[in-house]
Image (spheres, rainbow, N blue to C red):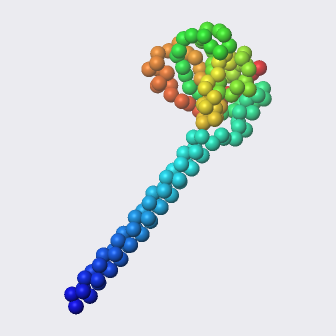
Amino acid sequence: MTKIKITNITNDIAEGHREIGKIRLIIWLIIFGLLVAISIIFWTIYLWPREEVQSRLPTVKNRIISAWITVYTDVGTMASGKQTYLGATAVSDRSLKFGTTIAVEGLGVFKVEDYTAKWVHARQGLTIDLWLPITNKEAILFGKQRRLIQLTN
């Protein structure tokens, strides 16, 4: 009788270990699934190239479109070779050539003299980075605004 009890206990322990093993496997599969889901979400939001439909729109003269407007204050030489000046701008759409004039709603007319980093256009769409002689604090307060723009030449 003692032998039967020991084997029953041993079988119960073995069965318990099998159940724990199954639970651990299920937990690992859930964790793996969550990691895969997070990776896919990250890829689609940050790394997957977006449709560049909006980037083609600005090349049509006099068309009014929406763009992100930001401000930068660094002084120096721009990609066009000119020094920064009031009225100069950097754009994310590289199809816009240097010297293209952009009218920004409520802010005035600016000339394309520089380009932003390539990833800006891929992640945020058309972005116009205006150079203004203001402080960094004022530029931060300006932030990132959605405004209408129009190419005038």
Q: Quadrant of the N terminus?
A: bottom left
Question: Where, by quadrant of the figure, is residue 68 drawn?
Answer: top right
Residue appearing at x 59%, y 20% in the figure: 130
Farthest residue to the bottom: give it: 1
Q: Is residue 6 left or right of residue 88?
A: left
**Is 79 or 136 nearer to us in this picture?**
79
Q: Is residue 74 above or below residue 12?
A: above
Query: Where does residue 7 sit, x and y in percent of width and height?
Result: 29, 83
Query: Where does residue 47 sit, x and y in percent of width and height?
Result: 60, 40
Q: Is residue 81 above or below residue 4?
A: above
Residue appearing at x 26%, y 88% in the figure: 4
The answer to whether residue 144 is seen in the rendering is yes
Residue appearing at x 61%, y 24% in the figure: 116
Question: Where, by quadrant of the figure, is residue 77 drawn?
Answer: top right
The answer to whether residue 110 is seen in the rendering is no
How many numbered marks are there? 0
Farthest residue to the left: give it: 2
Query: Where does residue 134 sit, x and y in percent of width and height?
Result: 50, 15
Q: Is residue 134 above or below residue 69?
A: above
Q: Is residue 130 above or below residue 63?
A: above
Q: Is residue 19 left or right of residue 88?
A: left
Q: Is residue 34 left or right of residue 103?
A: left
